[in-house]
Amino acid sequence: MPDVVERTGRQAQRRSELREFLMNRRARVSPGEAGLPDGGARRRTPGLRREEVAVLAGVGASWYQWLEQGRDISVSPQVLDSVARVLRLSHTERRHLYVLAGLNPPVPEAEPEPRDMCEGLHRLIDTWMPYPAHIMDRYYNCVAFNEAAAAVLGISRDNSWNCLVDFFTDPLYRARSQSWERNARTVVAQFRAACAADPGDEGYQAVLAQVREASEEFVRLWAERDIEDAGQIRKELQHPLVGLLCVESTALKVPARPDLTIVLHTPLDEANTAAKLEWLASPEGRRGAMYPVAG
């Protein structure tokens, strides 16, 4: 019984938020912005009337009134999208509308303005030095990395680096990774979770086609249909200059840039990893990396 009361209370709160949100956003849209003549007449309230929203969204006036009142009515994604269009909602606001209406929200997208965050994210991974850090797009393509990621993980500006494809196909990375077998299943399961959010996306399909063709091990693991959210992975790497490195990679999302994932590598309290990474980033370590090393 207490669970029922709590659930009912949450639903009432959500409907109240839905009512206030729709009224607030309706008041922000002028008739002119919606493509309607205002006729020069004074309005009792700013913005659009309920009836105008209903007409522009192609829904019944009574139905929209019930929606704004937070009544328990049937709502479809198509109708919510029409209402969101009329109210000029951003993608984030549209997702919020879905949640308040009790529907699964659409896949997150980056708004046009936050796309300018890239310089700040570059500063973030550069500040992470002397520890490796890089940024992936939604398809696991590496779009930015710091010097430590190049020195430790072998990421290079000379070739396109896809963190899934290269995990399974780069012989140098595999030779240095002592945790490859243990982590392979996790890497595949996390990529399946990413694909599941947008299964028809051609970008995911292109990466899958490439790695399937190149790696039988990936094909075998993919067929097991494991799924796992991105989080932390322990990595043990044998570096040719400093020996064993034990790090923990953490995948971080920035809500304003859902198309990007920041991967930070933190040294573990093993094998003197922190000191080794600091040496690799030092002038002496950089000079040592300039000369060929078997590996």
Image (cartoon, rainbow, N blue to C red):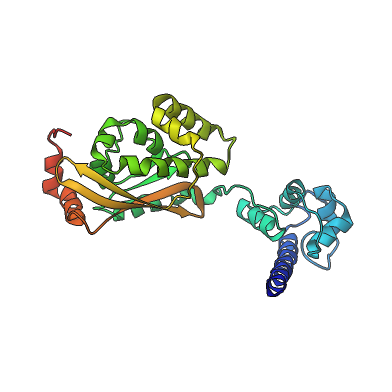
Question: In terms of image quadrants, where is residue 53?
Answer: bottom right
Q: Where residue 203 sits: x, y (%)?
A: 51, 33
Q: Residue at x 69, y 75 (%)?
A: 2
Question: In terms of image quadrants, where is residue 18?
Answer: bottom right
Is residue 50 toward the left or the right of residue 184 in the image?
A: right
Does residue 197 sit above or below 101 in this rendering? Answer: above
Q: Residue at x 80, y 54 (%)?
A: 74
Is residue 66 toward the left or the right of residue 271 in the image?
A: right
Is residue 4 toward the left or the right of residue 196 in the image?
A: right
Q: Where residue 196 sits: x, y (%)?
A: 56, 42
Number of numbered markers: 0
Whether residue 160 appears in this view of the structure is no
Quarter that holds the C terminus: top left
- Which sits in the foreground, 158 or 118? 158
Q: Where residue 246 sits: x, y (%)?
A: 25, 51
Q: Where residue 56 sits: x, y (%)?
A: 81, 49
Is residue 47 toward the left or the right of residue 188 in the image?
A: right
- Which sits in the foreground, 241 or 53? 241
Does residue 56 sit above or below 69 in this rendering? Answer: above
Q: Residue at x 51, y 35 (%)?
A: 204
Whether residue 276 appears in this view of the structure is yes
Quarter that holds the N terminus: bottom right
- Which sits in the foreground, 222 or 88? 222
Question: In terms of image quadrants, where is residue 294?
Answer: top left
